[in-house]
Image (cartoon, rainbow, N blue to C red):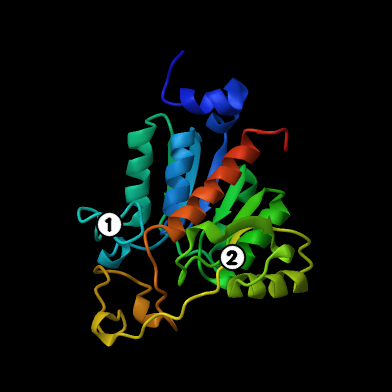
Amino acid sequence: MLNQFSRTQLLIGEEGINRLSHARVAVFGIGGVGGYTVEALARSGVGTFDLVDDDKVCLTNLNRQIIATRSTVGQYKVDVAKQRILDINPDAVVNIYKTFYGPQTAGEFDFSSFDYVVDAIDTVSGKIELVMQANQAGVPIISCMGAGNKMDASAFQVADIYKTSVCPLARVMRHELKKRRVKKLKVVYSKELPITPIEDMAISCRTHCICPAGTVRKCTQRRQVPGSNAFVPAAAGLILAGEVVKDLSNYGGNL
C-alpha cells in the first residue's frame, strides 16, 4: 500500500522498512548535527526515538539548526524535535530527556534498550562515556567528530576512529579510546583543516550573551565559541543518519 515511506521502500525493500519501524534509536545532542540526524531518521521511518539534550533554542542557532526558528527560540530542543517527529510520523514513539549527558548522568539510561546510539554531543568526556556504555551493552554506536570552524561540507568521510586524520577532536578521541582499549568506533569526520574563528567582540557571545532564560550551560563558559554555518553540520548529521538507516535496514546485508 502506498504510504509516506514508499519511496524509501523502493530502495531498501519492505523488510528494511519494517526493521526501521521496529527500531529504537537514541540520539544524544539535538543541535546542528543531531537535529538533522533526527529529521532524516524520522523521514526514514524509525519507530522509536530517545532524544537527549538539556539545551534551549537560542537565536544564534538559527544559522544552522533545523529545529531553530523564530517561533522556537527559548523552547527546549528536545521538545521541538519531538513535535517535528510527530508531525512527520504520528505513529512514532518519542522519549525525551532534558539531560546534559556525561559520566555523572550515564546511569540514567538503559543502553541495552537501544538498537542504535548516535553521538552528536561536543564534550570529550561525554563522547567517551557514550562509547563505553554502548560497547558494554553491545549496541552499535556512531560518533560525529568536529563540525565547527569548517566550510567544506564535501570533506566528510565515514571511517573507523583509528583511520582518521586531520580532525583535532578525532585525535583526542583516538588517544583516549586507545587508553581504554576500545578497538573500533565508526565515526563521521572531516578532513578539512579547521578555520580559526574571527575575533569580533561586537558579535561575541562572551560579551553579548543572548542565551534564553534558564539556560544552564551558556556559551560564555566555553573556551572558544566556534564558527558555524548552515551546511557543514547538516551534512554531518545527514551522513550519520544514512549510516544508521543502512545498518538498521540491513541494506547490502551488513548485519
Kindly identify the residue that appears in the image at 32 percent across and 57 percent down.
76
Q: Which of these two is toward me, 225 or 192?
A: 192
10 Å crowding of disc 2: few (<14), some (14-19), many (20+): many
Q: Is residue 225 left or right of residue 58?
A: right
Residue tagged 1: 75
What residue occupies the far left of the structure in this picture?
A: 71
Tag 2 secondary structure: helix
Q: In the rendered view, would you say 112 is above or below 188?
A: above
Amino acid carrying mark 2 in the image: Lys
Q: Quadrant of residue 156?
A: bottom right
Farthest residue, direction top: 1
For image coordinates 70% across by 74% down, the residue present is 176
**How many numbered marks, from 0 up?**
2
- Along the line of sight, the residue nearer the viewer: 142 or 160: 160
Left or right: 72 with respect to 50?
left
Q: Which mark is residue 127?
A: 2
